[in-house]
Amino acid sequence: MSPRIHLPSGWVTFVFTDIEGSTRLAQLLGPGYRPVLREHRRLLRHTLAGTDGAELLTEGDSFFLAFPDAGAAVHACLTAQRALADHDWPTPEAAPRVRMGLHTGYAEPRDGEYASPEVHRAARVAAAAHGGQVLCSAATARHADPLPDGASLLDLGLHRLRGFDDRERLFQLVAPGLERSFPRPRTADAVAHNLPTQVTSFVGRQAERTELRRLVETYRLVTVLGAGGAGKTRLAVELASGVVEAYPDGVWFVDVAAVTDPGLVAFEIAAVLGLRPEPGRPMVDTLVEYAAARRMLVVLDTCDAQPAASAEVISRLLAGGRGVRVLATSRESFGVPGEVVWRIPPLSVDPGPDGGASDAVALLLDRTAAARGGRSPEPAEQADLRRVVRRLDGLPLAIELAAARLRVLSAGQLAERLDDMLGTLDAGREELDPPVVEAGWTGNQQDTVDLVAAAIGAAPVTPASRAVQRSANERHLTMQATVTWSYRTLGARSARLLRWMAVFAGPVDLPTVQWLLDEDPLDPLSVLVDKSMVLAEPRASGSTYRMLDPIRAYAARRLIEAGEEQTARDRHVAWSRHALERAHLGPDGRPVTLSLYALDPLAGELRAALRWCATGGSARSGLRLAGGLDQWWRERGLAREGRLWLFRLYGRIAETGESIPEAELAAAYHMHSLHAGADGEFAEELRYSQRAEAAARQAGDLGLLARVLAGRAAPLVDMGQFVEAERVCREVIDWAYEQNVVSDALLAVYNLAELLWRRGALDEAAEVLGAARPVEAARPVERGRRSVDMLLGLVALARGDLVAAHEHLLVALRSRMNHGYLGRACDTLNAIAVRCALGGEPVTAARLFGAAQATRASLRATPGIHGPYWLARQADLRRSLGDAAFDAAWASGAALRLEEAAALALDLEHPDLTTPHSPRFTTPAPRRSTAS
């Protein structure tokens, strides 16, 4: 340096610059590097030293300058970076990327130099910068006033500079013409990462975090798979933030969703790592070389945006360096060697082992409190909140959107509106219009990737590509956008299968899907599973497949838009009828004893089919479906629901004018009458019984008429007209014998036996039931109920024959439990309780009474003709035990599940083993010999 140069003193701003990767650039350019270096020096001298700056040292590609004014120093650096960017270099690859650092401190020159720690601090600030970046210390930020027009300083937070114990707040110069997006500063911080900062708390998923962390520690490539909105990104970031210290060379987050061209995936990763393109060399080679000797974790997010390109880069990275691990999130797997696929489950909707809120409810509570200004939901809303998360299948994005709705709705109102799931969750989130692009420069986070694209000669990013990027960024603003992101990647067959599978209400197996489509669905189904739009749930009997409810709602919309709803849902109704028919048949196709348990798994599908029949399909098909569930409605305590479906189907008939045969109307009216009786609506029961009889007579089907007439006594019994009911039963039975349809009049036989038992005509009741036993045994829909044994047990109790009562009642209970007749099993438990009371087991009797009553209450079942008898026996038992003992035993029984109460009853000892001098086990006295 010339001694004539004046060096500033006092508050001095020191500036250091150098070319990032100068050694590599020199190797790449060879003889061409010298003119590039010379031109670089000329530009910097003209813009830096040509101002008020004093050039202290120029060595190789480095400059060291001192400025008396911080604002002038910032202005000089901005001018220099613009000059470098605007210069016409021999090739884009030859453009030097210069990093600059500024620091302001008090210093006095001595002997033409500065011996001050402030100089070293400035050098460390420059060393923390990346090529093309201008960093300054907090001291410079305070003194640099005013800043150049359009410029600002971006606070990058506190960082520990190498060689200094304290932390320095660094700022980045932001202005038109400068790049904006850079990796974290190269400082001596304990950890290196660029993980996005989350603005909301992470809730739940403790088990998932533990399992995923174990996988990441064990395997080098772990792909987190799941549907859109399942929480893949959030979980990956949360996990990565907890393992930063395990990776000395950093944990780096790369959002592949922002990449609009497969060829730019490697460049996006390079931009995050601070790497630059090298002329004549693929970017992926530069990446591999950089990563080879490093130990780092790369979190690649939303790889399904560019699956093939992501897979290629990942394979090269893993092959090139043993210290590199990749945690990827995607809606489909890569299928590369060494990949471990981990499917992220929905948030748990069931309470934890300690009885605390489930993860899904906890998330909804947390986000709802935030949406309501810090006010937590009221305790009264807890049940509705659980309903909401169950309807949303525990999908985190759907829960987040639901919480926003709870700003204006109660939890109950939201739960009721979820039939229109997408409309409710996405309300108020209309699609945004494309932003207006103004003339001139606009800076954004995409600048770095655009420059990289320019460096390899790619065309500038078009408005269409910008729209894709905007779509990527906004894909989680609504459920519709989230699912559309995946739907657009489907082929025609897979998209059609997704739409058609929306008709199913729950999990289905492969043959069911094949039945619906009438073709082999394996290929398109595999695509949907691979893209996480359908969940595959392996079981020993074969995999089942299901969609999360938000995805089903989306697919249902698409089904309507495609004009396929009528065909698909009619096909689903046909499958539902087929499934009902199969429930009555064995593997050989022959009728078997009806088990209502076989109908339980079909309930959701049958309800979906009924909904379509009542709104857009055939009411006649709906009546047939309802008929297949006849006994199931009542035995599950759902008689009221059965009535409501029938009312809706009647309305559909009136709306469409569809012709229904009289026989089918008669069967529906008869079923309606039975439902109404079970629901305590006795006037309605009588009205539909009369309608059923009129329609059956019009139909001319004797068997149907017998079944309908056999039910005539039920309304009379329910209204207390027992004498008239008995007369009707006898008339119907006599007529049925004359017409040779007595098997269809079995209900009248049961009713007559109950009436005879009630008035004490026990011998006749036993005779009637004895004749009915072979008839019942021949009817698959009747024999599982074992009504004959149940009633014979009651007759035996009335006679005081505990042995016969025990045997009949246990046969009835065992059969009813085995075949799913839960309501009738409660009657049998009551009868066994009477047997225990008469047999000297009063505490057990009270427990069984309590268990039966608790289950009947949950089933909303009416007591029927046996009700007064049970009440009388319970009153006797209370007097025998005393109030306290009776209530304690009753409460103990009420706490039992039905299965537990049945097991208790079935374990009772036979009366012969507990009754002294039982005739069955009494040894007859030896006969005296009469021989003379």
Image (cartoon, grey):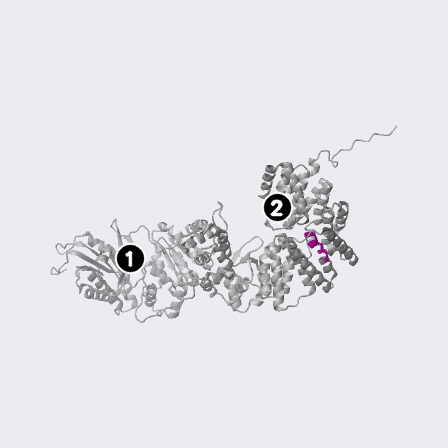
**Residue, disc 2:** 853
The reply to whether residue 302 is in sight is yes
Q: In the rendered image, which residue does mark 1 sit on?
A: 155
The residue located at (76%, 54%) in the rendering is 733
Chain-order first, disc 1 or disc 2: 1
- Give whichever of 299, 89 is nearer the camera: 299
Rendered location of residue 333, percent (x, y): 46, 59
Look at the image and say whether residue 78 sits in the magenta stretch: no
**In-image side of 485 versus 183 (left or right):** right
The answer to which of 483 and 320 lies nearer the viewer is 483
Q: Residues within 10 Å of mark 2 (few under 14, many from 20)?
A: many
Q: Is mark 2 on a helix, strand or loop?
A: helix
Look at the image and tell me in which quarter the N terminus lies: bottom left
Total numbered circles = 2
- Residue 713 in the magenta stretch? The answer is yes
Q: What residue type is labelled 2?
A: Gln
Q: Is residue 135 above or below residue 855?
A: below
Sort mark 1 into few (<14), some (14-19) or many (20+) by Cα contacts within 10 Å. some
Q: Quadrant of the C terminus?
A: top right
Q: Which of 234 and 250 is in front in this view?
A: 234
Q: Is label 1 in a helix, a strand or a loop? A: strand
